[in-house]
Amino acid sequence: GENVEQHPSTLSVQEGDSAVIKCTYSDSASNYFPWYKQELGKRPQLIIDIRSNVGEKKDQRIAVTLNKTAKHFSLHITETQPEDSAVYFCAALTGGGNKLTFGTGTQLKVEL
Amino acid sequence: GAGVSQSPSNKVTEKGKDVELRCDPISGHTALYWYRQSLGQGLEFLIYFQGNSAPDKSGLPSDRFSAERTGGSVSTLTIQRTQQEDSAVYLCASSPVMNQPQHFGDGTRLSIL
C-alpha cells in the first residue's frame, strides 16, 4: 500500500522566516496531495492541495511543489507568523482515489 | 454553510463496552470517510463510503469495528467490546465525490478506561 514519509517532525523558525516541510510517497498512482493544518484540539483544516498534472501551486504565503518523478512534494510557508504555529500533515490520495494516506506530521513553531 | 458534524465530542467508557460514534456530513457530499488519530500521531484511514456503492472497509483494524451509512447521509461507527488501545480521536470527513478535497469534523475523543 501507499506509504507517506514526512520531515522534519518538528520545525522551529523565527517570525518572518520561511518554513519548508517535505514529504515523499511510494505509490506512483497517487494523483492528489493535500496539506492540512491542525491546531491543538482542533480539526485538521485543508490549507492547500495539488494534483499530479501541475508542478506548483501558490496561495498567498503558502505554496506547494510536486516532483512526480521523485515522488516528492513540499509545503513552503513564507513570512511566517505566530498564528502559523500548528501541526501540518501532508497526504496522498490513493486506493483508486478513495483514501488519504497521511504523513506523521510536522510540529511548526514560529517564535517571536 | 454547516460543516461536518460529529457527536459526541467526548466519550469515556469502560473496557468491554460498545460505543457508537455519529457523523453528519456536509449536505450534498456523497463521499464519507472515517479516520482515527492516536495521541501525537497522524491520521489512520478506517473506512470509506461513496453513494450507494459497497464501502471500502480495508482500514478497519479488527472485526470489532463496523460502520454504516443510512440513506446516503449520516454515518455511525460502532466499536464493540472496546479495548484500551481503541482510545483515540475518531475523525469523520466528507467530500462532494471521491477524489475531491476532504473536509473534517471536530472528531470524537474516545477514552477507554
Image (spheres, coloured by chain):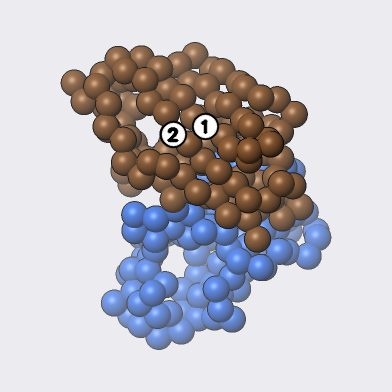
Name the residue: 60% across, 47% down. A25
Q: Residue B40: percent from the left, percent from the top?
A: 34, 54
Q: Are marks 2 and 1 on the same chain?
A: yes
Nearer to the camera, B21 or B101: B101
In the image, farthest residue toward the right:
B53
Location of residue B74 by image quarter:
bottom right
Decide if residue A45 is in sight here. no
Name the residue: 42% across, 42% down. A7
- Three-letter code for the amino acid on which mark 1 is drawn: Ser
Instruction: Report which colour depicts chain A.
Output: brown
Name the residue: 75% across, 29% down. A53
Q: Is residue A52 left or right of residue B90?
A: right
**For the residues marked 2 and 1, what is the alpha-carbon distance in whole angstroms?**
6 Å
In the image, which disc is placed on residue A74? 1
Nearer to the camera, A85 or A12: A12
Residue A76 vertical placement versus A7 (above, below): above
In the image, which disc is placed on residue A107? none
Marks 2 & 1, CB-CB < 8 Å contact: yes
Q: Chain of mark 1?
A: A
Residue B58 vertical placement versus A38 (above, below): below
Q: Is residue B2 left or right of residue B83?
A: right
Residue on which the image places disc 2? A21
Q: Chain of mark 2?
A: A
Chain letter for the blue part: B
The quadrant in which the N terminus of chain B is found is top right
Residue A16 vertical placement versus B98 (above, below): above
Q: Residues within 10 Å of mark 1 (few under 14, many from 20)?
A: many
Q: Is residue A52 left or right of residue B21?
A: right
